[in-house]
Image (tube, coloured by chain):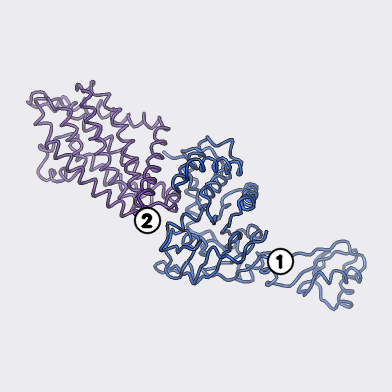
Chain colours: A blue, B purple
Amino acid sequence: MKWDEGRALIKVQNLTKTYKSTVAVRDISFSVSSGEFFGFLGPNGAGKTTTIKILATLLRPTSGTVILNGYDVVRQAADVRRSIGMVFQDPSLDDRLTAVENMELHGMLYGMPRRLMKDEINMLLELVDLSDRQNDLVRSFSGGMKRRLEIARGLLHQPSVLFLDEPTVGLDPQTRNHIWEYISEVRTSRGATVFLTTHYMEEAEGCHRVGIVDHGRLVALDTPNALKRAVGKDVLTIRTSDPATAVTVIQRELNINPDLDGETITLSGLDDGEALLVRLVATVPGITAIGVPKPTLEDVFLKLTGRDIRDEPASAVERMRTRHRSVSRRGRH
Amino acid sequence: MMLKPFFVCVYVIWLRELRKFLRERSRLVAMLGQPLLYLLIMGQGLRAIFTIDVPGFDYLSFMYPGIIGMTILFTAMFASVSIIWDREFGVLKEVLVAPVPRSAIAVGKALGGSTTAVLQGTILLILAPFVGISLSLVAVLQLIPLMFLLAFAITSLGTLVAARTETMEGFHMIMNFIIMPLFMLSGAFFPIGSAPDWMQPLMKANPVAYGVDAFRNIFFAGSPALDFMVYYPLSYDVLVLAVFSSITVLLGMQAFRKVD
C-alpha cells in the first residue's frame, strides 16, 4: 500500500530530551506522512518510548518542536491528544471492568456522541474478534486479547494516528503473529496512520519506512529495502554434487573467490547477485540448490551500530515491568 | 479551563470507581469485618472500665461514631491511594493521554472514593440499635452528607498524597504515617477533652476528629451526655471539614496538572 507522501502528519524537528544527567533523545528530526506505516526500531533504552511519549504529550521535550496533525504538542496538547490513539507498552486496561465498559469510558473521555460510540464499539470489537467476549471482565482475558482490545480502544475516537509502543512485547510468538494480522487488518480497513516502536526486526520489516534509533540518535531512516541495500552487497549460496570442482570453476570462469563450508559454497560481496545467477547456472556443472539470502534489518542494525540488537541486556525498567506483571497476575486486593 | 471535558472526566472516573465497588461485593463484606471486631472486642472490653459518672454515657455507643469514622477513613484512603496502583499499572495513562484536564482526575477520584466510603458507612448504621442508639430517618439523612463531607476531605488528602507518590513502597509509608495516626488521634476511643495537653493540638489538627465529632453531634443530639460526648458545635465541625477539603482538593488538582 502506498502512502500519501505529500502530507506530513507528524513533523519532528531537532527533538531533544534530557534527564538530569542523561540524554534520552538526541536531536532527532523526521516526518511521518498520512497513511504511512512508520516504525521506530532499536534496542531497549534507545529512546523510542521517550520519543513516543513526547509525541503523545505525556512528556515535554527539552528542546525542538513536534507538530502533529497541525498542532504543537506543547502548546496545543488537547488538540494533539484528540488526534492520536495510543497503545501503551504496559497494559492500561481496567481489568475489573468489562471489554465494553473499557471502550465506553474511553469514548466518553473523548466526548463521542452516544450513538456513534455504540456503533464504533460494535464495529471495532468485531474487527479484533472480541464481540463474543464483550461483556466479560478484562481480567479473564489472555495477553493477546487484552492487546487486541487496547488496539480497538485506541482507534475508537477515530484518531489520525495510532501509536503502538512495543505492542507485542511479552506475548508468545503465535499471539504476536496474530496481533500483527489484526494491526494490518486495522490499517487497511481504517486507513490509519500507524507509528510503531519495536525491537523485533521482523516487525519492522512490514513498515513503509523504518527509523533506526540507538542511544537516543536516529541513525538511519528509509524503507526496509533501501536500508538493506545500503548495508551490503548480495550473497549467493549454491550446493553442487562436486563442491571442490565447482569452487575451481567459479574461480577460473567468474573470477570470484567463494567460501566453501561443508557442502555449501557461499559467494559474497556481489554487486548484482540476480544477474550472476544466470551465469552461475550456465558455468557450474551439477548445481543441486541455489539460495539467495537477503540481508535483514538485523544486518542493518549490526552494521550501523556495531552491535547485535538482541545482545542488549534488558534495562532496569524492563525487568521491573516483568516483575510487576507477575505481581498483577497474582491478582489485586 | 475546558469545562465540559472537565466534568466528563470527573464523571468517567467516578463511574469507574462506583462500578468496580458495586461489582466486588466480597470487599463490602470484608470491610464490615474490621468495624465489627472493634465494636465487639474493643468496645465490649473497654466498656466495663471506661465508666464515668455522666448520665446517659455508654462507652460502646461513644465509640460507635468513631468506628464509622474509621471505616470512612480507611475506605476513602484506600480508594484514593489506588491512584498509585493505577499509575503503576498504566490505567491512569489512558486518562493522561485523553483530551481532558488532568486536574479532573483528582476531583473524580475524590468523588468516587467518597461515594464508596459513604455507602460503606451507611451500611454500618444498621448496627446502631445493637450499640444502644436509636436512629431516626432524619438523623440518617443528616448523617449521610456529613459522612460524605468527611470522606471527601480524606479522599482529597489521599489523592494529593498519591499524586506525589510513585511506588507501592510509598503506599506503606502512607499507611503507617498517615492513616494510623489519623485514626488513633480521631477521638474515636477517647474524647479530645480528656486527652493530655500535648496530644490535644494533634487531635485538633486531624480532619477525622471533626468528622467523628460531627457524627456524635447527630447521634447524641437529645442525650443528656451530649456535652461530654462532643467537643465542638456541629457547624464548626462542618466548617473545618469544608475548608480542609476545599484546600486539599485544589492542591490535588494542582498536583495532577504536573503528573507525567
Image coords of residue B205 (percent x, y): 17, 46
Q: Position of residue A86 (x, y in %)?
A: 51, 53
Identify the residue under disc 2. B259
Instruction: Kindly identify the residue that appears in the image at 9 percent across and 31 percent down.
Output: B228
Q: Quadrant of the C terminus of chain A?
A: top left
Label 2 marks a residue whose chain is B
Which sits in the foreground, B225 or A81?
A: A81
Residue drawn 39% across and 39% down? B15
Q: Amino acid at mark 2?
A: Val
Label 2 SS: loop
Q: Where is residue A11 drawn, in percent x and y?
A: 52, 67
Percent across and percent down for residue B133 are: 19, 23
Residue A327 visible to the viewer: no
Q: Which tag is nearer the camera, tag 2 or tag 1?
A: 2
- Relative to A205, is B199 on the left or the right? left
Depth check, front residue: A307 or A131: A131
| Location of residue B67 by image quarter | top left
Residue that numbered label 1 is attached to: A295
Image mark for residue B200:
none
Is disc 1 placed on a helix, strand or loop?
loop
Question: Within 10 Å of the Cα at label 1, are there few (<14), some (14-19), or many (20+) other Cα atoms?
Answer: some
Residue at the image position 84 percent from the left and 69 percent from the top: A277
Q: In the image, B85: left or right of B199?
A: right
Asked if one can make out residue B184 in the rendered structure from this viewpoint, the answer is yes
The amino acid type found where label 1 is placed reads Pro
Which subunit holds the residue at mark 1? A
Task: Check the picture and name the quadrant holding the N terminus of chain A.
Answer: bottom right
Badge 2: few (under 14), some or many (20 or more) residues near its Cα, within 10 Å?
some
